[in-house]
Image (cartoon, rainbow, N blue to C red):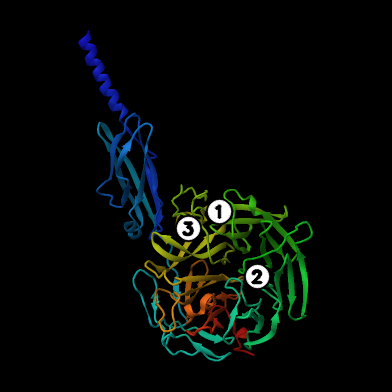
Amino acid sequence: MTRACSWICSALLSLTGLWAQTLQVSPAPVAFRMAATGPNAPPHKLTVSTASATPVKWTAAAGADAPWISVSPASGTASASSPAAVSVSLVGWRAQAQKPGTYDGTVTFSAPGSSPVAVKVTWTVVARRPDPVFSYLSGPKNCTNPGGYPDPAVCTVPDEKPPGNFTPPAVGGSFTDADFGGIVRVLTGPGVYHTYSNNNPLSANNKYLMTFTAKGVFDVVDVARAKVVFADVKANQDFVWDSYNDSVYYYPEGAAWIKHDLAKKKESKVVDYSRGGFHFTVIKRGGTTATSKDNWVSFFAPAEQHLCTLDLNTVTTYCADYSKIPGPPLRSVDYVLDSKGVDKTSGKRYVIIIAGGASAFYSVNVAGGRLDLEYRSPEDPESSGNHDGVCDPGEKCLNPSHSDTMEDASGTQYLVYDGFTESPCEVSLATYQLNKGLAMALPVELGGGRRKVMSLWRCPFPNAHGGTDEHIGCAKNAPFCVVSTVSPIQHPYEPTLRFPHASEVLVMRGNGDEIRRLVETRSVRFAEDGEAAYWSEPRAAISNDGSLVVFDSNYGNVNSVRVNLVETGFGNPAAATGAKQ
């Protein structure tokens, strides 16, 4: 009996030890979905566990038929009290080159004394929407494709200064861009700038242009005559043109909105928010963005942490306390945006507040007389967080720098800006559909709202000496946006660095349907200009109807910025450019 018991007990103990070491891997199976060429699908986090009280050594390996699977770490230990965390991801360079289709693979987890655990991995690559059509007024000339771009992305500029000898025409004169055929007309002499790229400096019907000098004086230029017609007007960088009347613009002063009528030579106070139940100390816009197509304008009160939008038609204000947004507080508010109108699908008018590290999206509740929070900016798909779409504390949020809103031909509202991705490593022009909510950051091919339109530049691209930069501006009344780019800061004796889409003005038609490369700006940021080097960035802006683009250029000369105009070829801007009198 003793021998039998000893044998049976020994067998039971052996079975118990085998059971104790049995590996468990969860969650399983694993599924990846991504659009062709990237960004890559985020990794999956798996847990390796066992009922054993002592650490069990395990290994993991992808099948030989699935070289696109990466496992990290590939070995470790796990016990009942200390499970192991494993990341299963796609091999970056393979993922970006993979053709559309569905692919199957396996990751096998093994441990001594335990049966192996096979985790099925499915990878679906969805075909990307077609690239935009690239168009030019003429050309392109002097351009080549360095590989990996749908257009001849790298261009040289004849007689580019420095160190060339290009001289712009006098005020009112024109020249034809040698690369893309845009006809550039010079509107001002040197030392004059236009207001911001998406704070459209052109009035409602392209009659006037708001400018300011290096001394901070605001002048209104008659576009057709290239002549200052209203000198030293009261305005600031937060000004906005009326959406209908060429003679009217608005600007905040203290806590009030001021209406300025050029024709009547009269100013009046629209709303004073230091009174009437608001008690705001000061209101701001961040120096960017215009009114909506139907005359709504947003602003914020930093001291009281309120975001508002004003319907200038009825002089009705809708506000929200942005300090009450769930999650970390919005700090260092940069600027605010209005959607161009009411979204056709959702029936909502959106107001966006952009702050340091995060953003928030609201809609106008007309019946309730307030702004309703729709969502905080979603989690960046390439963040190292939990990839649930919600930007939790410590996660990287989707957060634009230079951006604007656009309405396409169907009435859908978008946020438009150039975003950086790691896989592939590039800066690309993209649109983000506002009515998609937290899914706005996911590729449209996967049911989200982000459409990658084009690659501006891919790694490696210059990051030293101020790096690259770009600005976005979108038309109010037509589905067009303008993008302008710059090269790194340099000295007057150095040639300008040429890289994909450097120092260009491009216009996007629709939601990425067409890209028209208009002109090379010939503007250079010089170290000798100090902080003023920023104002040599073209900061291109587009007219309400999408027919005209305004941009700044110093034409390769230190401290010589002037304002320029170019027709896009979309629409009929002749009456506004001086071609017909």
- For disc 2, the marked residue is 238
Residue 133, can we see it?
Answer: yes
Residue 526, can we see it?
Answer: no
The image quadrant that residue 120 belongs to is top left
Q: Nearer the viewer, residue 204 or 527?
A: 527
Report x, y in % for residue 127.
40, 59
Task: Look at the numbered discs 1 and 2 and tell me whether their residues touch, using CB distance below 8 Å.
Answer: no
Q: Amino acid at mark 2?
A: Asp
| Residue 427 drawn above or below residue 183 | above
Would residue 506 appear left or right of 313 to someone viewing this image? left
| Residue 84 drawn above or below residue 142 | above
Q: Amino acid at mark 3?
A: Val
Q: Amino acid at mark 1?
A: Gly
| Residue 22 drawn above or below residue 422 | above
- For disc 3, the marked residue is 444
The image quadrant that residue 573 belongs to is bottom right
Quadrant (top left/top right/bottom left/bottom right) for the C terminus: bottom right
Q: Earlier in the sequence, mark 1 or mark 2?
A: 2
Q: From the viewer's perspective, is the residue at label 3 or at label 2 nearer?
A: 2
Report x, y in % for residue 568.
53, 79
- For disc 1, the marked residue is 437
The image quadrant that residue 113 belongs to is top left
Is disc 3 surrounded by few (<14), some (14 to 19) or many (20+) residues within 10 Å? Answer: many
Would residue 498 appear left or right of 395 to someone viewing this image? left
Would residue 152 appear left or right of 205 to someone viewing this image? left
Q: From the viewer's perspective, is the residue at label 1 or at label 2 nearer?
A: 2
Cα distance in 3D space between marks 1 and 2: 28 Å
Identified at 66% across, 82% down, the residue is 219
